[in-house]
Amino acid sequence: MLDSSAIYEVTDFVLGTTKTGTKMGTLNLRNTSDNTVLNCKIWEEALNRIDPKNFRT
């Protein structure tokens, strides 16, 4: 579960394509305080609004 007060670090980011041909990002976020990991998906609409520098690992 996402803790909105925690600090997360991108540990892995892969940009891919869905079966319908749209872009999709898959990333892992690690909570820096307790080392829990979130597996996340970001769809094309959201990817177009986010600066790619935010996904550096």
Image (cartoon, rainbow, N blue to C red):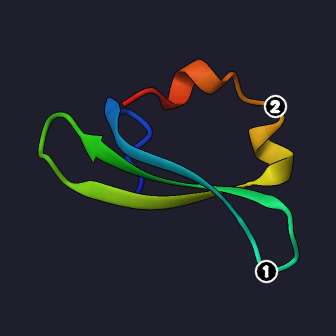
* Count of numbered labels shown in the rendering: 2
Seen from the viewer's position, the closer of residues 13 and 34 is 13
Give the vertical position of 51 relative to 9 (above or below): above
Q: Which mark is residue 19?
A: 1
Looking at the image, can residue 6 be seen?
no
Q: Which residue is mark 2?
A: 49
Q: Quadrant of residue 48?
A: top right
Residue at (64%, 25%) from the top-left corner? 52
Q: Position of residue 1 (x, y in %)?
A: 38, 62
Amino acid tagged 1: Lys
In the picture, which quadrant includes the C terminus?
top left
Direction from residue 47 to residue 7 in the image, left or right: left
Furthest-bottom residue in this view: 19
Q: Quadrant of residue 11?
A: top left
Direction from residue 33 to residue 12 in the image, left or right: right
Label 1 residue SS: loop
Of labels 1 and 2, earlier in sequence is 1
- Characterize the local packing of mark 1: few (<14), some (14-19) or many (20 or more) Cα atoms within 10 angstroms: few
Looking at the image, can residue 36 be seen?
yes
Q: Quadrant of residue 41?
A: bottom right
Disc 1 from disc 2: Cα separation: 22 Å
